[in-house]
Image: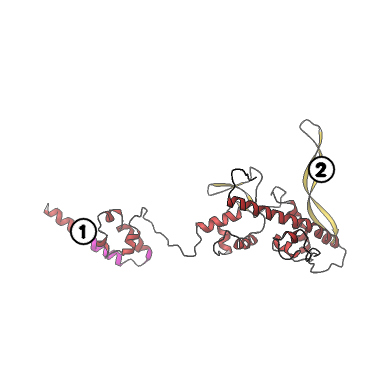
Amino acid sequence: MVREVKCRLLFGEVLRKQLKHNYASCSSQRAKQMHAKVISGTIVKKYKLGFMARGFVTKHLSRKYHEHKVLEFEQKERKNAIGAKDKDAVHAFMEEDINSSLAPEKKDCITEKGIKKQKRYMNDSVHRLYKQYLKSTHTHRYISYASFCRIKPFWVVKPTIRGRDTYRCVKHANMAFMTDKLHQLKIITKAASTDELCARMCCNNTSSKKCMYSDCAVCKNKQLPVVVSPEKMDVKMYSQWANKTEACLDKNQKPITVRVVTKSKISCTIRELIQATENQLAVYMKHVYNVGHQYKATSRCVTRGLDCNRMKF
């Protein structure tokens, strides 16, 4: 019995010296952390013997890892590291209907790392959406463009140009066709976003109904800012989406007419293209204001909550 007690005491003393020697040889923070996790734990805390380990593990590490469950290295996060709060804010911003549109078809799904999501198509480029995110109420601190791209939801993708299955607004698409053509011909400078295009035609205040509805006395007579006045009457072509009626047969082989959205090519001179763009801008600005106003009103209803006598469609 006495011999067994002596062996246990000797083993405890030898183990203490060995642990102290091993701790002294730890040169990196990773090694010190793993060493502290091996020594610390709930049993040492239970018998209140943590003070005996002060020689081969610091008090801070002993308290920090006394309830650890996994013996692996824990990387310390930087203060400016992208966390779950930033990721949730970016996801909420990108999933807003004003920034992306839900794919209409059931098969429009995308899977990544075992997570299946319905596709959403961005209404603008990633860089422009990043600038809008920094100005939005979702952001609580500055993040870089690279970080924004990294934590962007994978199911929010750039729309393709294969057809009208991207659920993009016809007015936005047609205006983009016309302004892109004018920019290609070096007639106007390319607008960075929809708001910037509308701001050129009003008092730089896209949230004002008077300006967007051309009721403002200051900006109602504004014209499209042309960089180079076209002297030639060259014929150019641009694309437009339009509703057309087509004759076909139903399942009973009876003739019927259906309305379809088709992409057509329009030929006109440069002056006619500028005039057509200015004519559509008036309707387009009203449309942009209505979309933004309706979305803000809907967001306010969701934020404040609805009573029992109201319903949101």
Q: Which residue is mark 1?
A: 12
Q: Nearer the viewer, residue 142 or 250?
A: 142
Which quarter shows the C terminus? Answer: top right
Q: Whole-percent x and y of residue 253?
A: 80, 31
Q: Is residue 41 above or below residue 22?
A: above
Q: Nearer the viewer, mark 2 or mark 1?
A: 2
Look at the image and give the residue range highlighted in magenta: 10-29
Q: Give the left or right position of residue 189, taking residue 56 as reference.
A: right
Q: Nearer the viewer, residue 248 or 303?
A: 303
Q: Which residue is mark 2?
A: 245
Q: Give the left or right position of residue 55, taking residue 207 as reference.
A: left
Q: Are marks 2 and 1 in contact (CB under 8 Å)?
A: no
Q: Element type at marker 2?
A: strand
Q: Whole-percent x and y of residue 92?
A: 58, 54
Q: Amino acid at mark 2?
A: Thr
Instruction: Give the main secondary structure, helix, strand or loop, of the magenta stretch.
Output: helix
Residue 289 falls inside the magenta stretch? no
**Residue in view at x 56 percent, y 64 percent:** 144
Q: Amino acid at mark 1?
A: Gly
